Each structure stands twice: as structure tokens, then as C-alpha cells.
Image (cartoon, rainbow, N blue to C red):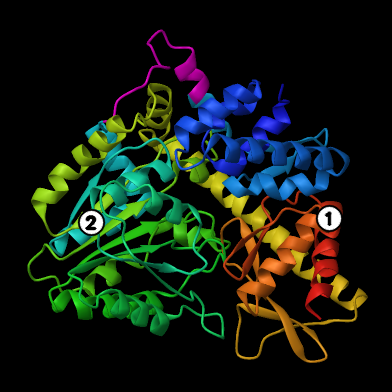
């Protein structure tokens, strides 16, 4: 039999069966479940994965600090309550709304509807994109239309399947691994993959690298799908300037004017967790208006943007599983049918949002006072994350000195610190402006993999690396003692690189 902590770890690792976290079952039951959900895996592979998880959990039980970063894999913001117990920070307003829905006499826990309520869609669009932005986009001939899905990952999967014509994909080399998993399970055509380095040497958006990758992807192709995790890129946490985003749009426009069909998918999971958050709350996705203005789609059919925000992260409502995929297009016809496309994809994949989720979200988004409470929570959460980041930098300075390494801000860069041995850079620490993570950029992918493998095999610290970026979950480091343990192990593993 599996313990709750084993099931939780297994669910987090695969991001598939969150419902198993509070239950227990036999190995055979889990094998049957994962054989159904993850078809490419054989029974033998699944058993091997289960056994590896069990072995890892034995280590974690004697070293609970090592488990903390695992929780951050799904973006869980952790705090300690007055008793010192770690828990997820859930805004009171969400808890009250859910309690109200749970106590109602209606059937709130059935599968719910795949079709979004028009009033809720408008409120969701205004919350995630901004009422002023929606109005400006409308004035410039764009139509904004919103659907509903059971969580951001499901929403991304639906969107990428709906618009899959076999066109190549363009995404950052360090992008979240879930995009590649979605690609592997697309219906119909399997698109080729073209990647680019998200940051240049100074820690700024690598517009040139993006343009080169897009150009390469479109050789002998009629179109492309671009996937970006903005603002507050995952994992770097950087918010790129409006000017940089407009330059990115100009790269796209060159091909749109040439008749190529471009779909841009924006995964905005962390857009409301900026450390200078007040401005972002007043004007979410502030870059989007100028960005769209830089695209000259004369036909109205060559370019579209689909934004997939995460209600789970933005409201810490992890169990509710809600997202509002939203399209921006000059095609009125496409805007009209988009919610139905999302609904059909949700119903066809048994991933409709539950009535409990829908009604809870309605209670909040349809009430201005509740929305204000959520925004106050977001401000407090962002302050907490910003404070942890400041402590992380100080902790890096302390352990760099202990290990006789240099730790200093990189010349001409406000986003990067260098960790050096005898003037040779071992890692760069990327300083985020939002989101749940900080990252360390290795010189090569091989060095990042070697570093991470040493952490896992010898120090029992399970981090996540995205290409050559190693992600540090500041969302899970709830006090200085934990931060000391984690950073000490990071510096210990760096010895393998010098």
C-alpha cells in the first residue's frame, strides 16, 4: 500500500492524477491508472517508476528538506502557520466562496459544463487581460473571446490541438517540459521543434535568437506555432520590457506580411506574481496592446494570439482546476466559435471544469469586492516572494564566501549575478522580477545535468533543470533554515564543475 506522501510525490512528478494525493491504493491499481493515462509507457516502465518513487520517499523521510522543492514543481506557494506547519497559502475569499458553493443545495460536484457563461467570460477576460486593454484592442479591430477549461495545462493542450496543422513549433530551449509532452500527444500531425536561448549574454530577451529560430522553422512551411511563457518567464521569472516585446512582434510581423500563418500561444501562469505588482494589477499584460499594434495582419486570418492564464496559481485555488483560454484575433468568425472549440475539446477529453469550480469562480469574479480581496492577496504573496528572493541573494553571498567563490553582479546586467572561481564563471544566478522561482544558468547543458544528478544522487535534493537553467523554488523555502540547507547543497554540488 502507498502512503499519502508517496501518492502525493507520484502525482506531483507526473502532473496527472492530483486526485490520488489523498487516497491510497495497490501498485496494481496505480499501474492500471497510469497505463490508461500515459499510453506510451509500458507496464514494466510504470512499475520501475513506482519503485523508484518508493526508494526516493525512503530517503525523503529521513531528510524532509529535500522534499520541499518537489512541491514547487506544480507552483505551490508555501508558508508556515502559527504552529510552524507548512501549508499552501489560500486567500480567505476563495475559501469562503468554496464553502458557500459546497453548502448549497444544487449539485455542485458533478462534471459541470464545458461552455463558459458569457458574463463570467467577460469578467475573466477583464481580470486577466485588463478591461482597458480589451477596449483598446476592440478599437483597433481585434475581437477578444474566452473559453473555459479544467486548468491551465488542459487549456494549453486544447489550444495546441485545435490549431495543430502540423506547422513547426518555436519555443525557448529552457521552456517548461510540459509543452513537449503536449506535443507528443497531439492528435494528427507531429510538428517539428525549433528552440532558441531565451536570454542573451546580458540577461535580456534574446530577440535575435528568437527571430533566427522562427526564420529557420518557416523554411518550406506555410506557418508556425510560437509558445512563450510571459510575463514572468518560467523558470527565469524575468519580465521583459514593452520595447523588447514590441521588437519580438516585429520579428513575427515580417513573416505575417509575407503571408505566413502564425499562432502565438502565451502561457501567462505567473502574470499576477510580479514583485512590483501594483502596476501589473492595474494593467495586466500591459505589453499586449503595443504588441498587437506591431502586427500588420491585413487579411485578418494570418495571425492570432491565444492567452492561457492559470486561475489555480493566480488565486492559489490549486484543487479547483480552472483556466480561461482567450483568443485575440481580427477574425470575428473565429472569435465567435473559439469558446465552442474549447468546449468540444474539453468534453472530448473528459476535462470539463466541475460545477464546484465554476460556481466558486463566479462567486469571486462576479463580485468587485471579492476581486479586490484577491488582488490584496496577490500583493501580499508577491511581497512574500520578493522578501524570500532578497534573503536568497544574501544566502548565496554567505555560502560563496564560505566556499571561497566570488559572487558579484555581472557587468552591464541588472538581471544576472556571477558565481566564479578564479575569475571563471561556474554559474549565473538569474534574478527574477516575479513568479515562484529563481534560476541558476550553467555554461552548458551537460554541466547542468551533471550538477543536478549530483544533487539527486548524493545530496538528496531534487531540483528541476530546464535545459541549462536549474530552477530554485523560492515559493517553497519558508524560512532561513531551509534556505541555508538548500543553498549549502547547491554550493556543494558546484564542486563537480571546478
Mark 2 crowd level (few <14, some 14–19, many ≥20, 10 Å Cα): many
- Which contiguous range is marked in magenta? 98-114
Tell me the quadrant of the picture where the C terminus can be found: bottom right
Question: Which residue is located at x 76 percent, y 56 percent?
Answer: 456
Q: Is 10 above or below relative to 276?
A: above
Q: Which mark is residue 237?
A: none
Residue 196 x/y as whole percent: 44, 75
Marks 1/2: CA–CA distance = 44 Å
Residue 416 x/y as whole percent: 64, 79
Dominant secondary-structure state across the stretch colored magenta? loop
Horizontal relation, residue 149 to residue 458: left or right: left
Where does label 2 land, which residue?
328
Where does label 1 land, which residue?
480
Callouts 1 and 2 close, C-beta under 8 Å:
no
Query: Does residue 320 appear in this view?
Result: no
Q: Residue 45: within the magenta?
A: no
Mark 1 crowd level (few <14, some 14–19, many ≥20, 10 Å Cα): few
Q: Is 65 above or below relative to 284?
A: above
SS of the residue at dot 2?
strand
Tell me the quadrant of the picture where the N terminus can be found: top right
SS of the residue at dot 1?
helix
Q: Quadrant of residue 252?
A: bottom left
Horizontal relation, residue 269 to residue 187: left or right: right
Amino acid at each position: 500500500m502507498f502512503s499519502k506522501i508517496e501518492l502525493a510525490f507520484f502525482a506531483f512528478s507526473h502532473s496527472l492524477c492530483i486526485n490520488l494525493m489523498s487516497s491510497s491504493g495497490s501498485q496494481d491499481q496505480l499501474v492500471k491508472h497510469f497505463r490508461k493515462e500515459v499510453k506510451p509507457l509500458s507496464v514494466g516502465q510504470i512499475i520501475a517508476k513506482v519503485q523508484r518513487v518508493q526508494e526516493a520517499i525512503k530517503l525523503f523521510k529521513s531528510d524532509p528538506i529535500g522534499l520541499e522543492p518537489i512541491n514547487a514543481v506544480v507552483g505551490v506557494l508555501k508558508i508556515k502557520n502559527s504552529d510552524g506547519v507548512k501549508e499552501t497559502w489560500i486567500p480567505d475569499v476563495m475559501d469562503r466562496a468554496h464553502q458557500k458553493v459546497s453548502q448549497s443545495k444544487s449539485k455542485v460536484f458533478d462534471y459541470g459544463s464545458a461552455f463558459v457563461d458569457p458574463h463570467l467570460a467577460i469578467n475573466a477576460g477583464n481580470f486577466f487581460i485588463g478591461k482597458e486593454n480589451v477596449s483598446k484592442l476592440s478599437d483597433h479591430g481585434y475581437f477578444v473571446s474566452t473559453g473555459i477549461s479544467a486548468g491551465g495545462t488542459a487549456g494549453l493542450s486544447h489550444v495546441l490541438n485545435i490549431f495543430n496543422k502540423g506547422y513547426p513549433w518555436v519555443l525557448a530551449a529552457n521552456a517548461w517540459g510540459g509543452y513537449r509532452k503536449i506535443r507528443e500527444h497531439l492528435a494528427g500531425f507531429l510538428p517539428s521543434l525549433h528552440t532558441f536561448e531565451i536570454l542573451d549574454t546580458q540577461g535580456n530577451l534574446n530577440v535575435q535568437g528568437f527571430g533566427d529560430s522562427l526564420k529557420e522553422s518557416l523554411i518550406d512551411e506555410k506557418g508556425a506555432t510560437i509558445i512563450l511563457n510571459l510575463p514572468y518567464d518560467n523558470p527565469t521569472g524575468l519580465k521583459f520590457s514593452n520595447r523588447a516585446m514590441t521588437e519580438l512582434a516585429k520579428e513575427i510581423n515580417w513573416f505575417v506580411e509575407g503571408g505566413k500563418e502564425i499562432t502565438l500561444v502565451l502561457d501567462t501562469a505567473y502574470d499576477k506574481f510580479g514583485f512590483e505588482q501594483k502596476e501589473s494589477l492595474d494593467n495586466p499584460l500591459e505589453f499586449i496592446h503595443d504588441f498587437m499594434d506591431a502586427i500588420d495582419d491585413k487579411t485578418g486570418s494570418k495571425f492570432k494570439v491565444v492567452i492561457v492564464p492559470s486561475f489555480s496559481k493566480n488565486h492559489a485555488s490549486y484543487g479547483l482546476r480552472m483556466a480561461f483560454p482567450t483568443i485575440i484575433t481580427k477574425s470575428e468568425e473565429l472569435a465567435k466559435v473559439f469558446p465552442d472549440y474549447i468546449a468540444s475539446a474539453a468534453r472530448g477529453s473528459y476535462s470539463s471544469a466541475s460545477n464546484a469550480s465554476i460556481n466558486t469562480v463566479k462567486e469571486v469574479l462576479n463580485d468587485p469586492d471579492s476581486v479586490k480581496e484577491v488582488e490584496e492577496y496577490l500583493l501580499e504573496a508577491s511581497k512574500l516572494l520578493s522578501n524570500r528572493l532578497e534573503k536568497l541573494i544574501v544566502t548565496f553571498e554567505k555560502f560563496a564566501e564560505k566556499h571561497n567563490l566570488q559572487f558579484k553582479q555581472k557587468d552591464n546586467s541588472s538581471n544576472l549575478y556571477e558565481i566564479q572561481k578564479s575569475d571563471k564563471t561556474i554559474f549565473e544566478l538569474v534574478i527574477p522580477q516575479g513568479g515562484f522561482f529563481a534560476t541558476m544558468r550553467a555554461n552548458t547543458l551537460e554541466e547542468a545535468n551533471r550538477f543536478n544528478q549530483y544533487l539527486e544522487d548524493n545530496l538528496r535534493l531534487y531540483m528541476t533543470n530546464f535545459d541549462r537553467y536549474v530552477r530554485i523554488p523560492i515559493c517553497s523555502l519558508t524560512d532561513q533554515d531551509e534556505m541555508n540547507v538548500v543553498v549549502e547543497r547547491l554550493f556543494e554540488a558546484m564542486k563537480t564543475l571546478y
